[in-house]
Image: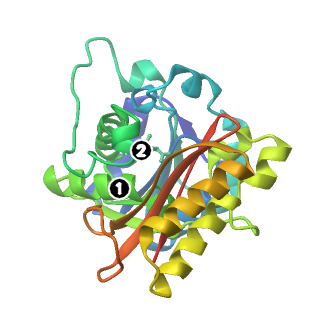
Amino acid sequence: MTAPILRSLPDLRTMTAPWLRAGARIGVVPTMGALHDGHLSLVAAAKRDCDHVIVTIFVNPKQFNNPEDLANYPRTEDDDARKLARFEVDALWVPDCDQMYPGGFATNVSVSDLTDVMDGAHRPGHFDGVATVVTKLFTQTRATDAYFGEKDFQQLLVVRRLAADLDLGVTVHGCPTIRDIDGLALSSRNLLLSDRARTIAPRLHEEMEEIAKGLAHGEALAPLRERAVDRLLTAGFTKVDYLDLRSQSDLRSVTDTAQPARLFAAAYLAGVRLIDNIAV
Ligand code: PAF
């Protein structure tokens, strides 16, 4: 059975009020729709842990720094509802823009430091948009638990930081990246790749694995990185925004793997920006 789709805050509050009174665990899976197996793995984790589960679908204009990217973002609500049916979640929370940001809305949630690098540096305003909407989604749904993919690892750290800093009482769970058989990290943006670009896209993950292997054999980061960027550009990627080795706890730049580190990448292929990260 497909879950009820709620679009107004009073309806959502009516649903959650008895859960709150009962002290239930309320799991939220925030999404922008175009659901894939990565999202569904978050829903499965929430269903495992929580008494009630709400999946949110809201394409958040505040986190798009490029209007074309916002216009092209895939919107597949009916399909999304069908994909969720087998999980028997309690509700889909699908507010529209007026519900989320009514006239006069003037509040911004901004997390510092973690957002100075990578997507924070390349997409001005992006993480303020994410932090603002996630804070609202948490308070709207009265979540006790929230589920995010490690594919957006910087986002995961930002959300953990804001949940702790603002005493939101939400436990933020990070779930492993789900990949296609050829290694490409699942992402709603993959739907925007042409057939040809889709065959090239897994190169991003392959090159990251090559760097990880080189580091494990004691090779220096800089030449490994340079070779990987060259090969990506030769393969058809048009721009590499970053290919960085960073501390997994605070995203400080590192040059070796003496401490838990991750390799992070963002690159453009046929106008689509792909991101990925792996533990090294
Ligand atoms: O990861 C996403 O899909 C979005 O950034 C999120 C967390 C739903 C906020 O809009």
Q: Assign a secondary structure to mark 2.
A: helix
Which mark is on residue 19?
1
**Looking at the image, how many numbered discs can be counted on the residues?**
2
Residue occupying the point 46% across, 55% down: 152
At label 1, which amino acid type do we have? Trp
Q: Do callouts 2 and 1 mark residues in contact (Cβ within 8 Å)? A: yes
x and y percentages locating residue 141 in the rendered image: 36, 45
Q: Which residue lies furthest to the bottom in this view?
A: 217
Q: Assign a secondary structure to mark 1.
A: helix
- Where does label 2 land, which residue? 15
Residue 85 is left or right of residue 260, and the answer is: right
Residue 146 is left or right of residue 198, and the answer is: left
Residue occupying the point 25% across, 12% down: 104
x and y percentages locating residue 234 in the rendered image: 71, 50
x and y percentages locating residue 4 in the rendered image: 58, 42
Which mark is on residue 79?
none
Q: Residue furthest front?
A: 223
At label 2, which amino acid type do we have? Met
Is 131 situated above or below 49?
above
Q: Which residue lies furthest to the top in this view?
A: 103
Residue occupying the point 56% across, 67% down: 208
Q: Which of 215 and 165 is in front in this view?
A: 215
Residue occupying the point 51% across, 70% down: 176
- The C terminus: image quadrant: bottom left
Residue 212 is left or right of residue 182, and the answer is: left
Q: How far apart are marks 2 and 1 (CA)?
A: 8 Å
User: Is residue 66 in view from this perspective?
Assistant: yes
Is 120 situated above or below 73?
below
